[in-house]
Image (cartoon, helix red, strand yellow):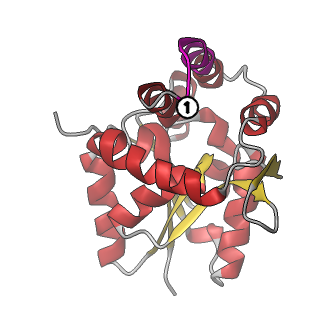
Amino acid sequence: MTRLALFDMDRTLLEVETASLYVRYQRQIGEATLVDLLRTLGWVAQYTFGTLDMAKVAQKALRSLAGVPEIVVAARCDDWFRRVVERHLTDGGRLAVRAHQERGHTCAIVTGASAYASRPLARLLGVPHVVSTVFEVDADHRFTGRAVMPLCLGEGKLARAERLAEELSLSLDDAVFYTDSISDLPLLERVAEPVAVNPDPRLGRLARARGWRVETWRARP
């Protein structure tokens, strides 16, 4: 039976976090202001230190998408990925995905970001599955301004990963999961092989205390 290999995206497969990169891109195309960027940087800092209420932030961020066609955001994210994000792909991530693929494992990106932000990376790496935060769309394929719960964070990420495993008739009992963030502890503790990649300080301390593998993945200069 094949094994699940799960990969976080921000600061794991990619050396950077993508939220602020996207807002910087929006500023370049005239869709965001400096205030928007500073607000996003503040959210990222709070998330890093574990003080961010992601449900509230998601509600605020998604309200601005209400009525926008899904295809517009998908196309915009494809352009953003090519122009801004692709260069930040880590060598360690690319090689790890390839190694799992060569062993016949089933790979998936499991991220708190949206599918629109993460699918371009999945296509680049040949990863067939994306587990992400889901934006609600109406019958006309326009965003409602709400997320489909749970968000793909913390316990929600675990729940969505378990759903994927069930759909594929696989198990997390022998899965491997690569991530940088202590917020992913529920899924790290559920899989057979947790791997801390570019870990934040709290995850780094915990990984070393528990004897988990710790790796450093960097993008090419």
Q: Up-down: is 23 above or below 5?
A: above
Q: Quadrant of residue 190?
A: bottom right
Q: Quadrant of the C terminus?
A: top left
Q: Is residue 195 visible?
A: no
Is residue 43 found left or right of 53 in the rendered image? Answer: left
Q: Residue drawn 28% across and 49% down?
A: 92
Which span is picked out in magenta? 31-42
Q: Nearer the viewer, residue 204 or 102?
A: 102
Callout 1 secondary element = helix
Q: Nearer the viewer, residue 191 or 48?
A: 48
Q: Position of residue 116 (x, y in %)?
A: 55, 54
Q: Position of residue 69 (x, y in %)?
A: 67, 55
Is residue 156 found left or right of 203 in the rendered image? Answer: right
The number of numbered badges drawn on the structure is 1
Q: Is residue 15 visible?
A: yes
Q: Quadrant of residue 58?
A: top right
Q: Residue drawn 25% across and 39% down?
A: 219
Q: Residues within 10 Å of mark 1 (few under 14, many from 20)?
A: many
Residue type at mark 1: give it: Leu
Q: Which residue is mark 1?
A: 203
Q: Position of residue 100 (x, y in %)?
A: 36, 69
Q: Nearer the viewer, residue 60 or 110?
A: 60
Q: Quadrant of residue 127?
A: bottom left
Question: What is the residue that sits farthest to the bottom in this orientation?
Answer: 1
Q: Could you tell me what secondary structure mostly forms the magenta stretch? A: helix
Q: Up-down: is 111 above or below 204?
A: below
Q: Position of residue 94 (x, y in %)?
A: 29, 56
Q: Up-down: is 37 above or below 148?
A: above
Magenta span includes 140: no
Is residue 64 found left or right of 204 in the rendered image? Answer: right
Q: Residue drawn 49% across and 31% down?
A: 26
Q: Up-down: is 48 above or below 101?
A: above
